[in-house]
Image (cartoon, rainbow, N blue to C red):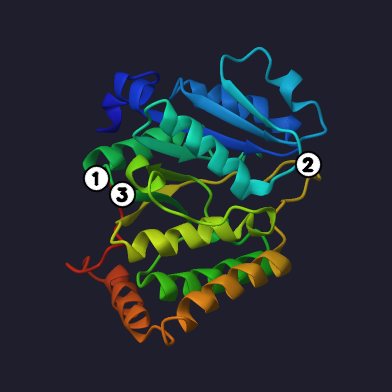
Amino acid sequence: MIADLQPHGDTIASAYWVVIPAYNEAPTVHDVAARAQQYCRNVIVVDDGSTDGTPAILADLKITLLRNEENLGKAGSLWRGFQYAIAQGAVGVVTLDADGQHAPEETPLFVAASLGNPDALVIGARRRDQRKTSFWRYAANRIADFWVGWAAGVHLQDSQSGFRLYPASLLRTIVVKTDKSRSFVFESEILIEASRRGVVCGHVPITVTPRSGLRSSHFLPMLDILRITRMVAWKILSRGFYPKGLYAYLLSLIGRHRLALPHSRSNTLT
């Protein structure tokens, strides 16, 4: 399947779009966008009020540049990119970070999975050793995986990965808050709401390159994990602690170590 999805293959070029939210990522965003364009000519960079000259850096690329006059946060930038892509007829939208951690060359993995199930939400799952960039960051991610999995009622191998493919069928109908305080909450909440709608949340394995130089991540482990936990706790408490969701999560977690369970809605897509 992947062999049929070489750079600028007809399927990718016409039906799938890439959205890259960028906030002060001038050292890496040009390289990320240029590489992404080799595998999908429909590339959108959403400049989230950057002050580092991002527009000028991207001027030589034939991409769509959307600019937020003020910083809206990752959620608002993603949503703006989604709406633009859907308006252009996209059937699926791949998201990847502008900091160079994600490999645009792996975009065909997501498209191949989507071709097998066009309505699936595909998550790029990092290997455990790649997620352990720091103790606190890894611990925060694992805590988020548990809470999000419980609220969603399904085991999610990497709930905090930003390398994903969202089906247009989901993006046209789902309603999730995208204000600035929910920049990183959004990506967890949309997994919960998608799973509760019966959307398959599948996974493909990806590689990750650590951020270069002294630049720090925009994800704040303590604050953002608190925001995510608060959102997820409400999702669970509003359903009376959602025992059904916890039971389904535990069953799918067991299935991860055995054969895929027939009723599991989270699978590794290949």
**Label 2, label 1: how far apart the Cα atoms are:** 39 Å
Q: Is residue 50 above or below residue 221?
A: above
Q: Which residue is mark 1?
A: 117
Q: Secondary structure at mark 1?
A: loop
Quadrant assignment for the N terminus = top left
Q: Say which amino acid is labelled 3.
A: Ala
Q: Say which amino acid is labelled 1.
A: Asn
Q: Secondary structure at mark 2?
A: loop
Label number found at residue 235: none
Label number found at residue 120: 3
Query: Residue 181: x percent and y percent?
Result: 69, 59
Q: Nearer the viewer, mark 2 or mark 1?
A: 1
Q: Residue furthest left?
A: 262
**Label 2, label 3: how far apart the Cα atoms are:** 36 Å
**Label 3, label 1: how far apart the Cα atoms are:** 6 Å
Q: Which residue is mark 2?
A: 213
Which quarter of the picture shows residue 172? top left
Earlier residue among tags 2 and 3: 3
Cβ atoms at labels 3 and 1 below 8 Å apart: yes
Q: Say which amino acid is labelled 2.
A: Gly
Q: Is residue 50 visible?
A: yes
Q: Is residue 79 above or below residue 10?
A: below
Categorize mark 2 by other alpha carbons within 10 Å: few (<14), some (14-19), many (20+): few
Query: Residue 41: x percent and y percent?
Result: 46, 20
Categorize mark 3 by other alpha carbons within 10 Å: few (<14), some (14-19), many (20+): many
Q: Nearer the viewer, mark 2 or mark 3?
A: 3
The answer to whether residue 39 is left or right of residue 61 is left
